[in-house]
Protein backbone atom coordinates (compact mmCIF):
# COMPACT_ATOMS: atom_id res chain seq x y z
CA UNK A 1 0.00 0.00 0.00
CA UNK A 2 2.80 2.42 0.86
CA UNK A 3 4.49 1.67 -2.45
CA UNK A 4 1.27 2.37 -4.35
CA UNK A 5 0.78 5.74 -2.57
CA UNK A 6 4.39 6.71 -3.25
CA UNK A 7 3.96 5.82 -6.94
CA UNK A 8 0.68 7.78 -7.10
CA UNK A 9 2.14 10.94 -5.51
CA UNK A 10 5.25 10.84 -7.67
CA UNK A 11 3.17 10.39 -10.85
CA UNK A 12 0.80 13.23 -9.93
CA UNK A 13 3.69 15.57 -9.03
CA UNK A 14 5.34 14.95 -12.43
CA UNK A 15 2.10 15.66 -14.29
CA UNK A 16 1.30 18.95 -12.56
CA UNK A 17 2.87 22.30 -13.38
CA UNK A 18 3.74 25.00 -10.95
CA UNK A 19 2.64 28.59 -11.31
CA UNK A 20 5.19 30.67 -13.18
CA UNK A 21 6.17 34.08 -11.82
CA UNK A 22 6.82 36.66 -14.50
CA UNK A 23 7.33 40.35 -13.85
CA UNK A 24 4.03 42.09 -14.51
CA UNK A 25 2.79 45.62 -14.11
CA UNK A 26 -0.84 46.73 -13.89
CA UNK A 27 -1.10 50.28 -15.20
CA UNK A 28 -3.41 52.46 -17.26
CA UNK A 29 -0.82 52.91 -20.03
CA UNK A 30 2.76 51.98 -20.83
CA UNK A 31 5.22 50.44 -23.25
CA UNK A 32 8.65 48.84 -23.52
CA UNK A 33 11.20 49.59 -26.23
CA UNK A 34 14.35 47.54 -26.80
CA UNK A 35 17.30 48.56 -28.98
CA UNK A 36 20.37 46.34 -28.74
CA UNK A 37 21.35 46.13 -25.08
CA UNK A 38 19.27 49.15 -24.03
CA UNK A 39 15.71 48.88 -22.75
CA UNK A 40 13.29 51.71 -22.04
CA UNK A 41 10.07 50.95 -20.15
CA UNK A 42 7.43 53.35 -18.93
CA UNK A 43 4.08 53.09 -17.21
CA UNK A 44 1.40 55.54 -16.20
CA UNK A 45 -0.97 55.36 -13.26
CA UNK A 46 1.02 53.35 -10.74
CA UNK A 47 1.62 53.92 -7.10
CA UNK A 48 5.27 54.51 -6.14
CA UNK A 49 6.35 52.74 -2.96
CA UNK A 50 10.14 52.87 -2.56
CA UNK A 51 13.29 52.41 -4.59
CA UNK A 52 16.51 50.87 -3.32
CA UNK A 53 19.71 51.08 -5.35
CA UNK A 54 23.33 50.05 -4.95
CA UNK A 55 24.58 51.92 -8.02
CA UNK A 56 24.13 49.23 -10.66
CA UNK A 57 20.95 47.47 -9.49
CA UNK A 58 17.53 48.87 -8.65
CA UNK A 59 14.87 47.19 -6.48
CA UNK A 60 11.43 48.80 -6.68
CA UNK A 61 9.29 46.59 -4.42
CA UNK A 62 7.21 45.25 -7.29
CA UNK A 63 6.24 48.57 -8.85
CA UNK A 64 7.75 49.98 -12.01
CA UNK A 65 9.43 53.24 -11.00
CA UNK A 66 11.45 55.25 -13.49
CA UNK A 67 14.05 57.79 -12.53
CA UNK A 68 12.19 61.04 -11.99
CA UNK A 69 13.46 64.48 -12.91
CA UNK A 70 11.59 67.21 -11.10
CA UNK A 71 11.03 70.45 -12.93
CA UNK A 72 10.49 73.30 -10.53
CA UNK A 73 7.86 75.94 -11.01
CA UNK A 74 9.73 79.16 -11.33
CA UNK A 75 9.82 82.85 -11.86
CA UNK A 76 11.37 84.26 -15.03
CA UNK A 77 12.78 87.77 -14.56
CA UNK A 78 13.19 89.70 -17.81
CA UNK A 79 15.00 92.95 -18.58
CA UNK A 80 13.44 96.20 -17.40
CA UNK A 81 11.92 94.61 -14.27
CA UNK A 82 9.35 92.35 -15.97
CA UNK A 83 8.53 89.17 -14.03
CA UNK A 84 6.56 86.19 -15.40
CA UNK A 85 5.41 83.27 -13.21
CA UNK A 86 4.67 80.39 -12.68
CA UNK A 87 6.45 78.67 -15.53
CA UNK A 88 5.39 75.96 -16.30
CA UNK A 89 1.77 76.94 -15.70
CA UNK A 90 -1.47 74.98 -15.45
CA UNK A 91 -4.04 77.68 -16.10
CA UNK A 92 -3.04 81.16 -14.93
CA UNK A 93 0.09 83.18 -15.73
CA UNK A 94 1.08 86.31 -13.82
CA UNK A 95 3.00 89.11 -15.53
CA UNK A 96 4.34 91.92 -13.36
CA UNK A 97 5.33 95.11 -15.19
CA UNK A 98 7.09 98.25 -14.01
CA UNK A 99 5.03 101.41 -14.33
CA UNK A 100 6.92 102.52 -17.45
CA UNK A 101 5.78 99.45 -19.42
CA UNK A 102 2.03 99.66 -18.76
CA UNK A 103 -0.20 99.25 -21.84
CA UNK A 104 2.08 96.55 -23.24
CA UNK A 105 0.51 93.90 -25.45
CA UNK A 106 0.86 90.24 -24.42
CA UNK A 107 0.51 87.65 -27.17
CA UNK A 108 0.80 83.87 -26.91
CA UNK A 109 1.47 81.80 -30.04
CA UNK A 110 1.62 78.01 -30.40
CA UNK A 111 4.50 76.05 -31.98
CA UNK A 112 2.98 76.58 -35.44
CA UNK A 113 2.98 80.37 -34.97
CA UNK A 114 -0.79 80.63 -34.59
CA UNK A 115 -1.97 83.41 -32.25
CA UNK A 116 -3.92 81.73 -29.41
CA UNK A 117 -4.14 84.56 -26.84
CA UNK A 118 -3.81 88.35 -26.88
CA UNK A 119 -4.41 90.93 -24.15
CA UNK A 120 -3.48 94.54 -23.37
CA UNK A 121 -1.69 94.73 -20.01
CA UNK A 122 -3.09 97.77 -18.20
CA UNK A 123 -1.83 97.27 -14.65
CA UNK A 124 1.43 96.37 -12.94
CA UNK A 125 0.09 92.96 -11.85
CA UNK A 126 -1.66 91.10 -14.71
CA UNK A 127 -3.18 87.60 -14.62
CA UNK A 128 -3.62 85.83 -17.94
CA UNK A 129 -6.10 82.95 -17.94
CA UNK A 130 -4.79 80.18 -20.21
CA UNK A 131 -7.28 77.44 -19.25
CA UNK A 132 -8.59 77.03 -22.80
CA UNK A 133 -5.17 76.10 -24.18
CA UNK A 134 -4.14 72.48 -24.48
CA UNK A 135 -0.93 71.23 -22.88
CA UNK A 136 2.17 72.09 -24.85
CA UNK A 137 4.86 74.65 -25.55
CA UNK A 138 3.98 78.25 -26.40
CA UNK A 139 5.82 81.52 -26.98
CA UNK A 140 4.83 84.59 -24.94
CA UNK A 141 5.69 87.94 -26.53
CA UNK A 142 5.37 91.28 -24.78
CA UNK A 143 5.29 94.36 -27.03
CA UNK A 144 5.57 97.96 -25.80
CA UNK A 145 4.93 100.62 -28.44
CA UNK A 146 6.41 103.65 -26.65
CA UNK A 147 9.98 102.33 -26.55
CA UNK A 148 9.71 99.67 -29.30
CA UNK A 149 10.59 96.91 -26.81
CA UNK A 150 9.83 93.26 -27.42
CA UNK A 151 10.32 90.51 -24.83
CA UNK A 152 9.86 86.81 -25.57
CA UNK A 153 9.84 83.74 -23.34
CA UNK A 154 8.93 80.09 -23.82
CA UNK A 155 5.88 78.92 -21.88
CA UNK A 156 5.07 75.34 -20.95
CA UNK A 157 1.50 74.44 -20.11
Image (cartoon, rainbow, N blue to C red):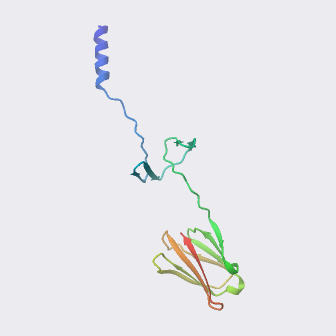
Residue 144 lies, in percent from the top left, at 63, 87
Residue drawn at x 57%, y 42% is 52
Residue 50 lies, in percent from the top left, at 56, 44
Residue 44 lies, in percent from the top left, at 46, 54
Q: Is 108 rendered above or below residue 47?
A: below
- Left-right relation of 117 to 21: right
Question: Based on the displayed image, in which of its 4 quarters is residue 103 positioned?
Answer: bottom right
Q: Is 118 rendered above or below residue 73?
A: below
Question: Based on the displayed image, in which of its 4 quarters is residue 80 positioned?
Answer: bottom right
Tell which of 119 and 113 is nearer to you.
113
- Left-right relation of 19 to 61: left
- Left-right relation of 156 to 95: left
Tell which of 32 and 117 is nearer to you.
32
List the single residue furthest toward the front.
Answer: 36
Residue drawn at x 71%, y 85% is 99
Residue 133 lies, in percent from the top left, at 50, 73
List the single residue furthest toward the bottom.
Answer: 146
The N terminus lies in which quarter of the figure?
A: top left
Amino acid sequence: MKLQLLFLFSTVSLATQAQSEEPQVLATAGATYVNGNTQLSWTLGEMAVATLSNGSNILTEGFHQPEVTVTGIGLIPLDDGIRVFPVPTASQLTIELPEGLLNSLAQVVDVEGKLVYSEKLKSQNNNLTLEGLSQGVYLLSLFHQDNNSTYRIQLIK
